[in-house]
Image: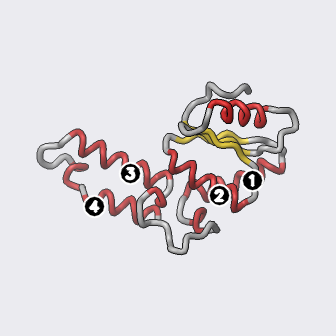
């Protein structure tokens, strides 16, 4: 599915990508953003996710190469009693990760622009606490909230 969406984006605007004609910077940036969405997860495109009814199951994983790798890696890290930080630039990607964590039963914390300051600090403290049950912390692109 990911390859299909990537091809659709490229084929729609192949002349701009190849540099034919006058290139509009904004249009090229839009294409790059669409390709970035495709590389993160095809469900970031409206209408890509199967449904309704919308379900949370293996289709979250098998439709995205990054999720396939994550799905193989996370159980191994959990067995080693490691904890994981995941950063993204897209809030909607955090929504997909949240669905994934619910489906797999991973305990997590989430931090994005809508998180209240009190909740933010509480979640950081929960994640950083010795013996924390929180396995995954995913957030919008900033490392400054964590101690290592």
Q: Residues within 10 Å of mark 2 (few under 14, many from 20)?
A: some
For mark 3, what is the residue? 35
For mark 4, what is the residue? 11
Vertical comparison of 35 with 23: above or below: below
Residue 74 - label: none
Lower position in the chain sequence, tag 2 or tag 1:
2
Lower position in the chain sequence, tag 3 or tag 1:
3
Q: CA distance from mark 2 to mark 3?
A: 22 Å
Q: CA distance from mark 2 to mark 4?
A: 31 Å
Figure colour scheme:
secondary structure
Q: Which of 122 and 103 lies nearest the eye of the viewer?
A: 122
**Residues at circles 1 and 4 in contact by the CB criterion of under 8 Å:** no
Lower position in the chain sequence, tag 3 or tag 4:
4
Name the residue: 37% across, 51% down: 34
For mark 2, what is the residue? 100
**Residues at circles 2 and 1 in contact by the CB criterion of under 8 Å:** yes
Q: Which of 129 and 117 lies nearest the eye of the viewer?
A: 117
Residue 126 picture location, percent across and down = 78, 36
Q: Secondary structure at mark 4?
A: helix
Q: Secondary structure at mark 2?
A: helix
**Residues at circles 3 and 1 in contact by the CB criterion of under 8 Å:** no
Residue 106 - label: 1
- Asked which quadrant contains residue 101, the reply is bottom right
Give the position of the C terminus as an image quadrant.
Answer: top right
Residue 83 picture location, percent across and down = 76, 41
């Amino acid at each position: 599915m990911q390859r299909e969406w990537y091809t659709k984006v490229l084929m729609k605007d192949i002349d701009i990508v190849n540099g034919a004609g006058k290139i509009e910077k904004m249009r090229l940036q839009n294409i790059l953003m669409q390709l970035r969405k495709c590389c993160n997860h095809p469900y970031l495109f409206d209408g890509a996710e199967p449904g309704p009814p919308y379900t949370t199951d293996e289709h979250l994983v098998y439709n995205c190469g990054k999720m396939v790798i994550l799905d193989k890696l996370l159980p191994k890290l959990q067995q080693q009693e490691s904890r994981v930080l995941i950063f993204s630039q897209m809030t909607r990607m955090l929504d997909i990760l949240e669905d994934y964590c619910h489906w797999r039963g991973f305990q997590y914390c989430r931090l994005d622009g809508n998180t209240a300051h009190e909740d933010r600090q509480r979640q950081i403290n929960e994640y950083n606490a010795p013996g924390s049950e929180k396995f995954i912390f995913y957030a919008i692109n900033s490392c400054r909230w964590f101690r290592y």
